[in-house]
Structures are given as C-alpha cells and as structure tokens.
Image: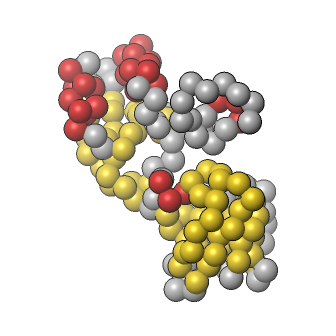
Amino acid sequence: MHATKTAPAGTWTEDAIDSVTLDYDARFRRRIALQTDGGKPLLLDLAKAQSLAQGDGLITETGIIIVRAAPERLAELRACDTAHLVQLAWHLGNRHLPTELSGDCLRIRYDHVIVDMARKLGAEVSEINAPFNPEGGAYGHGRTHSHDHRPD
C-alpha cells in the first residue's frame, strides 16, 4: 500500500481498513516504509514532513489506515493549584519541551533531569506508560523546533 495524503482525525467517516501504531517521534514523517498493525507493508510518501496525530487517517489506494499513538514512558506532573500548574507549564515551555495538556496535569516524555526540576518546584510526579499527544505548535504548526519565525 502507498499513502500519499492524510486526513485529520474527525474529518473522515469511512471505516479504517487497518491501523499503524507509532510513537511520538515516528509520527513526524514525510517518507518511511512501515508495517501496519495487521502486518501489511505500507509506504508513507507525503509531499512534506508532517506531524501525525492519534486518529489521523493515511489515505491509500485501498482505503484509510488509522494512526494510533503508541504508549511511551511519560512523566505526569500534578500541581497543588492552578497557579502552580501554570508555573510548571511555563518552565516546561521555557525549555521547549513537547507537553501534553491533560486538564489537571501535564505530561512530558520521561526525562530524569526535568523530573528532578519539577519535583524541586513542588510538583507531584508519577511515571506512567501512555500514548503521548502533546499540544501542537503555535501558528498552525504541528510541532515546535526553534525560535524561527519564518512563515514557511
């Protein structure tokens, strides 16, 4: 199978013919040979690299393959109140860390240095294994990489 286009989660209605489970790093791709969860070969061949999210569809000549986020080792940070949660979020953002905003907690990929920092800031930190779906970048970009503000 050959996927050259994607459909964002929630924009397609047909049943998926298969799925592909990828971690956060593997969900930022342009071109890669994959194997579906059903064991079929799949070539992802997009015009440009893009961030794939949980529930996105990969459009192939035979149907849609749904993207699933693989469970990963994460740190879940909890705060004593909203102001404390905002403070923790500021420190993570200041370090340009991909962060999942999960209501009353923040999730990051496990990093012992950042976990130590968060604990020193008073966070309650738990190690969990879960899919990682961090907040997308500003200005409609799926990921953040630097302070580069060029429109392309």
Left or right: 100 in relation to 110: right
Compared with residue 81, is residue 141 higher up or lower down, i.e. above or below? Answer: below
Name the residue located 43 percent from the left edge and 21 percent from the top edge. 94
The quadrant where residue 61 appears: bottom right
x, y percent for residue 92: 40, 26
Left or right: 72 in relation to 143: left
Name the residue located 58 percent from the left edge and 68 percent from the top edge. 32
x, y percent for residue 75: 31, 41
The quadrant where residue 117 appears: top left
The outermost residue toward the top is 83
Instruction: Give the quadrant of the N terminus.
Output: bottom right
Q: How many marks?
A: 0
Instruction: Give the quadrant of the C terminus.
Output: top right
Compared with residue 40, is residue 10 higher up or lower down, i.e. above or below? Answer: above
Compared with residue 133, is residue 22 higher up or lower down, i.e. above or below? Answer: below
Name the residue located 46 percent from the left edge and 36 percent from the top edge. 99
Colour pattern: secondary structure
Q: Nearer the viewer, residue 33 or 103?
A: 33
Instruction: Tell me if residue 14 can be seen.
Output: yes
Name the residue located 33 percent from the left edge and 39 percent from the top edge. 76
Q: Nearer the viewer, residue 118 or 25?
A: 25
x, y percent for residue 66: 63, 68
Instruction: Tell me if residue 15 can be seen.
Output: no
